[in-house]
Image: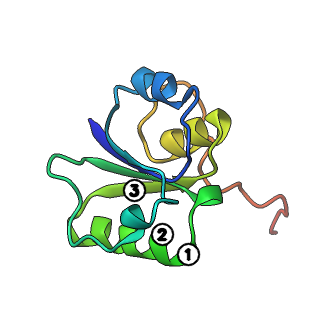
Amino acid sequence: MNAMLVGADTLGNIPEVLQEFGITIHRHLNGRNSSHQRKSDRLPAGTDLLILFTDFLGHNVMRHFRALAAEEQVRFIACRRSVCALKQSLDCAGLSSKQCGSCPQRCQPAASSKKRH
């Protein structure tokens, strides 16, 4: 699966995490460069997943890329630029690195603790 990453100046350990999930980085835009912020009319060809790092992007840039993903029917996730946040978002999106039928799904809404009679 090919991913386009938007946000974050440096990726640190993120490429290794994405490899665990079978995802390769197709393109990375840091979002700070003014040329990256100019509105493009399409995502790069072959993009299967859009990852937005929210702590490095402005609202308008995020809104634009989310609209492109929706228009082209490309799945997207938005998370902070941390390994833990990325892993959790990928798991919640159904892109788990480990498929296990007996594992509880952490992203399901929690059941109400109040009992109804």
Query: Which of the two residues, 45 or 40, is positioned nearer the viewer here?
Result: 40
Inter-mark Cα distance, 3 to 1: 15 Å
Instruction: Determine the secondary structure under disc 2.
Output: helix
Circle 3 sits on which residue? 76
Label 2 neighbour load within 10 Å: few <14, some 14-19, many 20+: many
| In this view, the mark in front (2 or 3) | 2
Inter-mark Cα distance, 2 to 3: 11 Å
Residue visible at 23% across and 63% down?
A: 73
Query: Which of the two residues, 45 or 85, is positioned nearer the viewer here?
Result: 45
Q: Earlier in the sequence, mark 2 or mark 3?
A: 2
Q: Where is residue 108 in the image (x, y as percent from the top left)?
A: 59, 51
Residue visible at 83% across and 58% down?
A: 113
Circle 1 sits on which residue? 59
Above or below residue 88? Residue 34 is below
Quadrant location of the N terminus? top left
Quadrant location of the C terminus? bottom right
Instruction: Determine the secondary structure under disc 1.
Output: helix
Q: Name, please, the residue furthest toward the left.
A: 45
Q: Given contact means CB atoms under 8 Å apart, are the residues at marks 1 and 2 in contact?
A: yes
Circle 2 sits on which residue? 62
Q: Where is residue 22 in the image (x, y as percent from the top left)?
A: 34, 25
Residue 105 in view in this figure = no
The image quadrant of residue 81 is: top right
**Residue 111 falls left or right of residue 36:** right
